[in-house]
Amino acid sequence: MRKILRLTGLLSVLLLPNILVAQQPPALPALKQEAAAEVDGLQTLTQQMVDEIFSFSELGFQEFETSRYVTGLLEKNGFQVERGVAGIPTAWVATYGSGKPVIAFITDIDCIPRASQKPGVAYHAPMIDGAPGHGEGHNSGMAVNVTAALVLKKLMDKHHLAGTIRLLPGVAEEILGSKAFYVRAGLFKDADIVLGAHVSHQFSTTYATGEGNFSGLVSVQYFFHGKAAHAGARPWEGRSALDAVSLMNAGWEFRREHLRLQQRSHYIILNGGDQPNVVPSEAAVWYYFRELDYPHIKELYELGNTMAQAATMMTSTTVDHRLVGSAWPPFYNKIIAETQQKNIEAVGMPKWTDADQALAKGLQKEIGTKVEGMKEKVEPLSEPNKNPAGGGSDDVGDISWNVPMVYLMYPANIPNLPGHSWANGVSMATPIAHKGSTAGAKVQAMTALDFLLQPELVKQAWDYFRNVQTKEVHYETFLSADDRPAIEMNKEKMEQFAPQLKKFYYDPTRYKTYLEQLGIQYPTVKTQP
Ligand SMILES: [Zn+2]
């Protein structure tokens, strides 16, 4: 007995220094290296996530399979999941760890109407005619963020790192439908840093207004109400709601000439009536009003409302409108961007194979754009454009005005594509997307470690946020108290295609990759005649 005691005593003396060493996490550079190696170790899971979400192809607010799959995976790995947040059934928050800092990851999950496309095929070849598809590449974002989060969890456990990791999906980003509601619901109230990730053909990050090619917007639907009548027999009894839509649009087209050059506005007719011999009692038009800042967006919104009222006066109809989406122009944090840039440079571009280059060049040739294959170098951190011209929008803008945030562009797509089209889906379940997502996951994990281990850096990010970014501009939501998320949108479209899509869901238990399941030769490129 005494011998055993003495032995244990001796053992504890021998082990003591080791225990002390084990409680000290390795230095930051070593931890970041460890994170990158762990991400490499998860390459198969990353590929499966990219492929699986590609095969779900779900439109905004209908991302049920995607959310079920991702939250299931996170729960299985010890994350706590809260579903249906902010009044949106497909939205959720997954959390691991405790205490400060709180680092939130966000990335979009919805797809594009009519963008169905066979992956790895360098010409238009829909999987299902007319079906939605990942013609923006949002299927890869969760692969990036979830891979990074799993690695961070492992390192936090192993090295006893304090802090909280949180993940959120960008629901219905294509209709700018969720993030203003997330902010209103307080989902970022205690977040210290937000690391967004978005698919791109380049590996880059930016700060402030970046290249200046983003606008903010409101997305508004106008519903006109008239009076039905027989269009041939008694047209004078009717009041056409479609006339009101046409007059509103005509008015907007004339007025467009006299708006600031920075504005961009576009519309589609949602409902133009039922058949020509019935005077349309109901008609609807959907506008996007884009501008560079809150006051100008608000001005356009009010002008739209005036135009709609004016059209009712000309037609003796009535109108009501609904805000279905909104986005502040994004503004990113300089401190986080500079930190992230170093990690992008350390990770570097993925190694593209001849097959990847052949797919990229084949597609570029097919759509008649500059044929230059894949990018080989990461982008430098550029100075923000002093004269932003505007462009697309992203509702992460609202988050970026509430918490210090950056948006990592990771290289999972082919350069020179039109965006929002089948062409942008071609690479999205191929080695290009798999390798680009792995590279992105490394940067996300490494950047999170920078902020988990250096409280001073968190403070600097907030100093920039408070004393530079929001010194004069203060966030104000476009939402009124009774605006609700448009969660019924895309329901019918998804129900129409779901039975056909289900037949093509990726089964990773039977096939190594989605390309293998579909029997697609990689790459499939048109041969010269
Ligand atoms: Zn997007």
Image: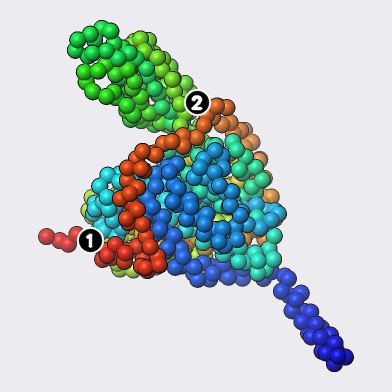
> Relative to residue 263, is residue 280 drawn left or right?
left
**In this orientation, does residue 209 appear?**
no
Q: Residues within 10 Å of mark 1 (few under 14, many from 20)?
A: some
Instruction: Pick the quarter of the image with the N terminus.
Output: bottom right
- The image quarter in which residue 504 lies: bottom left
- The image quarter in which residue 310 lies: top left
- Element at label 1: loop
Which mark is drawn over residue 298? 2
Please state which of residues 144 and 449 is positioned toward the viewer in this rendering. 144
Image location (x, y in percent) of residue 315: 33, 11
Image location (x, y in percent) of residue 498: 35, 47
Q: Is residue 280 above or below residue 151?
A: above
- Element at label 2: helix
Please state which of residues 37 and 29 is positioned toward the viewer in this rendering. 37
Residue under the point 57% across and 67% down: 35
Q: Which residue matches tag 1?
A: 525
Image location (x, y in percent) of residue 456: 70, 54
Q: Earlier in the sequence, mark 2 or mark 1?
A: 2
Q: Is residue 177 above or below residue 2?
A: above
